Structures are given as structure tokens and as C-alpha cells.
Image (cartoon, helix red, strand yellow):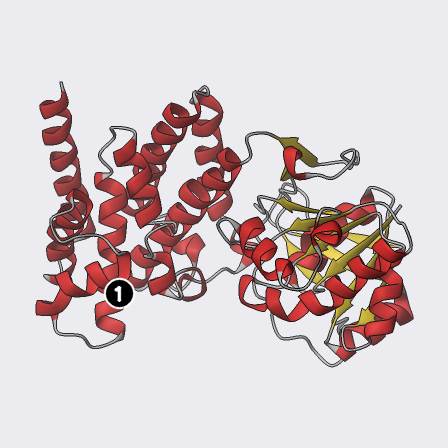
Amino acid sequence: MNAVIFGAGNIGRGFIGALFSQAGLNVTFIDVAKPVVERMNADRCYPLHIVGGKEEKIIEIKNVCAVDGNDREAAVAALLEADICATCVGAKAIKYILPNFVAGVKARYAAGKASTNLLICENLMDADEYIRELLADQLTEEELTTVGLVETSVGRMVPVPKPTGENDNPLKIAVEEYGVLPVDRAAFKGSVPEILNMVPFTPFHYYIERKLFIHNMGHAICAYLGNILGHEYICDSIVDPNVRLLVHNAMLESCDALSTRYETPIRPLLDHAADLIRRFHNRELGDTCARVGGDIPRKLANSDRLTGAAKSCVEMGIFPVFICTGAAAALHCYMVENALDTATAADTLVSLTGLEKDDSITICTLEMYEYFKNGAPLAEILAAADEKKHEILGMIV
């Protein structure tokens, strides 16, 4: 089998390329970074460094080559022979890789080839609908029916690579040991290929929300609390007992909401949250609070990891005090970074989240924001959140 991957960066090489290669597929990357393309075609392999587990190891990822994304003819030739495709370029760059993909789909359709399944390995809600809208303007209805837009849940953490020395291999990449890829079973055109550690599941929105509202949400809160406490790395933030408690309690709120919404047992979600806390400790990843907590407007947006998770809880009858506390930490970081007058906090939060001022999530977030604004110790903030949660639970009982 042959696979084409758009993007030979962190997730492309560090996760999807390795997944496909280790399953016995021949992998062709399409990328515009000429040094990466040239080195991959020279070596036909690259080293994958597994860090932070019981035993660190370097695995050689074989049967790989690359095509320059500016070479349309070569890209189409690779797509003509592909049994499966994936995009790993980052949500903002999807529109730039579509011309090659469109040309490949058209060539396959003209040649009577089988349908094309594109695994969307991007951190973007409703990524399939977004790409379908873009493709609808460039493909005929008949051509579009041959494309399977398959959402995935990318859970492997791959940090920004450290600067390489003059003699280092630029293709080498470090990743954590976790390497499971849930995919949307219902979105495939034709049969679902059997690939080790690729897990087909329906309804897939469960996995999308699990990733965004537990993993990404908890990771972000850990980053904002770490920034406030002066920690550079996620691994240093999560070992603070108060950070750990707040992050874990926020995750538990989301676990409760997802279990209720999808009528699934809560135990696997609780186990997943506990394992994420363990993975956040991985010092070898060198993941920084600045990176994980970057782009606060996006992460506080209405359907993203903080506000989206809080809304999901409210919809399921669970009030997300700890998620709101994490959102308050994000708001505080945003106000400080942009030197904004604290008197504008309410308007700023409403603008970032799209919520109304009288929304219960807005009110709770602003209440907890006051503690961060006034420089309260995190232990005091955690205690206040505990009291707030107790008060709400008492009302419900």
C-alpha cells in the first residue's frame, strides 16, 4: 500500500508517517521545505526518538520519500498511486495544500481510480466540513463524492524541535511513546484499511471532544497557571500540587459531561485523564507553557477548548467551576500580555468567548478572575473554586 502525507513536520514525521511506515506502507511526504525533501530522498528513512518512557529508544522509519509541494506534476503522480492520504500541515495552512490535492483527485477520477480517503490530522473542530466547503468550489459533484474526509484525533505530543547542530540529522524528531490514532469510521469511502494503532470509531465526535475538551483544555490550563506562577515548562507546572489539582478537577468536569452526553462509561475517560496528567510530566518533551498557552483568543473562542468545554458541561447539567477557573487564568494572562485595563475584563471576555455578560460561565469566570487579578495564591484560588463547587452541588442536591 502507498500513502501520501501533506506536511513533513512534527506530526507528519513524528506521528502519521511513523504510523503508516510501521504498518508496512510506502510513504511519500509532500512538503515545500527543500532541505527536508532533499535529505529524505537521499536517506529514504529518518530517526524517530521516543522519549520519556521506561526505555528511551531511536526507531528508524523506513520506506519514505518526499515530493516538493511546488512540483504539481510530481505531487499528482504520487497521489495517483496513493491508497490513503493525510494532511498534517496545521489548520491555517490547509488551503495552501488543497490545489495539489484537488489536482490529484481530478487525475484519479479521470483515470477511474478508487476513492480517495484523506485523514485530517489537524487540531480543528469540524475540519471535515471546512475542507468540504473549500473543495466544493474546485471539484465537480461527481469528483467530490469520491473523497472521504476522515477526521482524526491526534493525541501524540510532539514538541517544537530543538535547534540542530551542524552535523545533526534535520529529519530526526522526538516524540512521546503514546501513538494511538482514533479515526472516523463512518467517513471512509470504501473499506477501512487495517493499520496498526489506527482505531476506527463511530460516533467520532466523542473522540473529537475527548481530545479538545479533556486533553487540550487541561494542557492549556496547565500552561496558563504555569505562566502565572513563573514556570517555563509544562512539566514544572504540573508537579505543583495546586496546579495538578485544578487541572485534574477541570478534566473531571469534562469527563462527566462527555460520559453523560454520549452515554458511555466514565471509567475509561477517568483513566485517560489520569494518564494525560502523567504524560504532562514528561520532561524530555521540553514543552513550554508559552507554546501550549499561545494564541489565547483562539483557545477562549466559543467552541474551543476552554469555553467549548465549559458550554458542554452546562448543557449536560454540570457546572464547570474548575474549567471557568482555568479560563479566568487565560483571561488574566491575556490582559497582562496586552497591557489592558482590568476594568475592561468583562468586555474582553465577552468579546473573546462570544458569551453574554449574564451567562453563568461568564459570571463564574469573572468571579475567579478577580483572584488572579489581585495576586491571590493559587492555593487560595483552588479553595475558592472548591467552595463554589460545593455551593453549586448543594443547590442541585
Q: Position of residue 274 (x, y in %)?
A: 44, 34
Name the residue nearer the viewer: 123 or 143: 143
Tell me: 279 left or right of 64: left
Residue topped by disc 1: 333
What residue is shown at x 27% (from left), y 50% (from top)? 326
Q: Residues within 10 Å of mark 1 (few under 14, many from 20)?
A: many
Q: Is residue 167 visible?
A: no
| Extreme residue in the front direction | 141
Q: Position of residue 257 (x, y in %)?
A: 35, 30
- Eyeballing the image, is 51 above or below 33? above
Tell me: 346 left or right of 12: left
Quadrant housing the N terminus: top right
Q: Position of residue 382 (x, y in %)?
A: 19, 43
Give the quadrant of residue 192: top right
Name the residue nearer the viewer: 54 or 279: 279
- Eyeballing the image, is 288 above or below 144? below
